[in-house]
Amino acid sequence: MLRIIFCASALLCACSSLFISQSLAAVYKWVDEDGQIHFSDKPPAQRESESVTIKATPSTDAASLEQRRKTQQETLESLTQARKEREQKSAEKAAAKQKRKQDCDKLAARIAHSERINRYYRYGDDGEIIYLSDEQGDALRQRLKSQYQANCS
């Protein structure tokens, strides 16, 4: 990762030095017949143009280079931290999605099971079996289906 950043920085420096040397050359400004303003390093052949002076960038000294390096390092650390946070959020999102899928699969299995059985029952406080009425069984099936539609559709 650092090698890529170093190579990109070196390429940027090389390109900027070419740009600086180009910017020190003469620049001409002229207006065409449509009123558009143009800039070029060569004066136009049949138009009147004016020479434009471009301010050169200040030379870089050791202090400014160190400041730039420090700024780049801070930016790199900031981007690395942001990437880690995005990866963590993505992992949490994937885990939540997986848990939801498992919960929905369990609920679908309960619905399928409820369609196959005729009678529901529960255990009372003393351990005896208490059978539910058909209306209570239908209400339970409907509640399962509603939960599935609300959470899994």
Image (spheres, grey):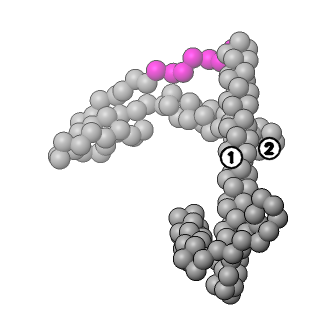
Q: Quadrant of residue 19?
A: top right
Quarter of the image with the C terminus is bottom right
- Label 1 vs 2, first from the N-terminus: 2
Mark-to-mark CA distance, 1 and 2: 22 Å
Q: Is residue 62 above or below residue 34?
A: above
Left of 54 or right of it: where is 57? right
Q: Position of residue 23 (x, y in %)?
A: 50, 31
What residue appears at the point 36 percent right and 27 percent down from the top-left corner? Answer: 52
Q: Position of residue 75 (x, y in %)?
A: 67, 30
Q: Is residue 146 above or below residue 39?
A: below
Whether residue 121 is visible here, answered yes or no, is yes
**Frontmost residue, 55 versus 79:** 79
Circle 2: is it few (<14), some (14-19), or many (20+) Cα within 10 Å?
few
Left of 72 or right of it: where is 35? left
Closer to the eye: label 1 or 2: 1
Residue type at mark 2?
Met
SS for callout 2: loop
What residue appears at the point 58 percent right and 73 percent down from the top-left corner? Answer: 136
Q: Position of residue 66 (x, y in %)?
A: 73, 18
SS for callout 1: helix
Magenta segment main secondary structure? loop
The residue that label 1 is drawn on is 89
Quarter of the image with the N terminus is top right
**Frontmost residue, 15 versus 74:** 74
Q: Is residue 141 above or below residue 67?
A: below
Instruction: State the extent of the magenta-drawn residues as a range.
Output: 55-61
The residue that label 2 is drawn on is 1
- The number of numbered discs placed on residues in the rendered structure image is 2
**Frontmost residue, 10 versus 134:** 134
What residue appears at the point 62 percent right and 32 percent down from the top-left corner? Answer: 17
